[in-house]
Amino acid sequence: MEINSLLMALGLALFGGGADNPTSASTQNPSPSTETYITSTDSHCKVINPNPQPNETVTWSGNCVNGFASGQGTVQWYQNSKKTDVFIGNLRHGKAHGKGKATWGQGQWEGDVYEGNYLNNNRHGKGKYIWKNGDVYEGDWKNGKKHGKGKYIWSNGYMHEGSYLNGQRNGRGKTTGTNGNIYEGGYLNNQKNGYGRIILVKDDEHISSWENDNIGHWQGDVYIVQGIFKDDGM
């Protein structure tokens, strides 16, 4: 039985504006790939510049250590003299390090907000990311990617809670659709893998056809289909 098409019909597939949508900002990491710095116009401290843009400037409200922005303060970015991105929190050697809050005001991340822990200018540790479309991820991060335990709630009410590895769903997880149907089980590289089960609410229109094919069973007020998944199929 090809289960993925059935999941789509049941409203359980994770699609649209979510953490695994390649057009989502979640697939990008606004952190530096090279050590490029910019000097603040007010305090003359160096701040890491992960995405250099034309006609941009920056200010820093905190202290300098050996010429680099360090400690608590606010990094305010400008482009053509207009405010864009802002970071409020702790810096070390010009990089976000420790607790902080970033609000993006331009480009592909405009409207996004991250608040949590940083390590070497990467999201790292506990943190919460809110996308401009209303999606929210809260949980563990490592080197700028979702990694560890976390919960992702889509703007339409879909929810996934479970384990992540390098930005992808890996390990045990639970996904709840807007109609109340649930998938819980294993994931590998964002696809259902290993033992899992689908839990359908009692008034779901697909149950009768599955009953006729002897697929699944009733357990109280819910209908359960379970088995071994591989590459989103069963």
Image (spheres, rainbow, N blue to C red):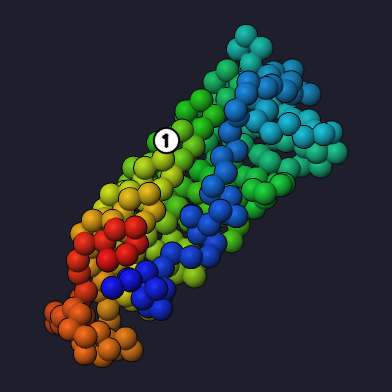
Q: Give residue 195's position: percent from left, percent from top.
A: 20, 59
> Which quadrant holds the C terminus?
bottom left
Q: Which residue is mark 1?
A: 142
Q: Secondary structure at mark 1?
A: strand
Taking the spot 68% from the left edge, 41% from the top edge, the residue there is 85
Q: Is residue 15 visible?
A: yes
Q: Residue at x 34, y 62 (%)?
A: 232
Give the residue type that dot 1 points to: Lys
Residue 136 position within the rendered picture, expressed as x and y whole percent measured from the top left: 48, 56
The correct choice, above or below, for 179 with respect to 165 in the image is below
Q: Residue at x 60, y 28 (%)?
A: 33
Describe residue 209's horizontal placement relative to residue 90 as left or right.
left
27 or 39: nearer the viewer:
27
Q: What x and y, as percent, mark residue 131? A: 56, 54
Residue 28 relative to residue 125: left or right: right
Q: Is 93 placed above or below 219 here?
A: above
For the question of whether residue 43 can be seen, the reply is no
Image coords of residue 76 (percent x, y): 70, 35
The quarter holding residue 38 reads top right
Residue closer to the observer: 174 or 231:
231
Residue at (76, 42) in percent of width and height: 83
User: Residue 31 occupies which quadrant of the picture?
Assistant: top right
